[in-house]
Amino acid sequence: MKKVRITVMRQTVYADLMEKYENPILHACDMRVGQVFVANGWQRPEGLCGSAWDSMSPFVMALAHGGGDFYDGWMKDPRSAMISCNDGFRPVSFLLETMDEDAD
């Protein structure tokens, strides 16, 4: 099993949707563009949003176990995936990349 690098690539905020539909939430998202996490195989990295992990964990699991090439060539690098969290008000896009380093 391999480690998987998770990099925060982009954050988007839909203020109009938040104003219309969302109850105010303090610290709804603490991710920062450029932030990097490393999943030790199937383990969620400390500090990574639980909701984001729920969205990406099946892809991390597949990559950690040697899988890839999702959706028949979707990514230029078959050992990677671009996944967004499921927050419809402030989605964050994450690049997942299989590392050569074995998980502990």
Image (spheres, rainbow, N blue to C red):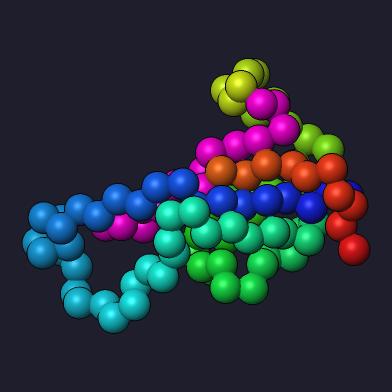
Q: Is residue 34 left or right of residue 41?
A: left
Residue placed at 72% from the left, 33% from the top?
79
Determine if residue 4 is in view.
yes
Whether residue 89 is in magenta: the answer is yes
Determine if residue 71 is in view.
no
Residue 95 location (% of width, % of height): 56, 43
Residue 35 location (% of width, % of height): 52, 59
| Residue that extends furthest to the front in the rendered view of this protein | 34
Residue placed at 61% from the left, 52% from the top?
6
Q: Is residue 104 left or right of residue 47?
A: right
Residue placed at 90% from the left, 63% from the top?
104
Q: Looking at the picture, tell me which residue is in the foreground, 28 or 22.
A: 28
Q: Residue 67 lies in what quarter of the image? A: top right
Residue 100 location (% of width, % of height): 84, 43
Instruction: Please give the count of numbered marks on the rendered protein.
Output: 0
Residue placed at 61% from the left, 22% from the top?
76
Residue 80 location (% of width, % of height): 66, 35
The relative height of residue 74 versus residue 97 in the rendered view (above or below) is: above
Q: Looking at the picture, tell me which residue is in the foreground, 76 or 85.
A: 76
Give, as a single range, the part of the protein colored magenta.
77-94
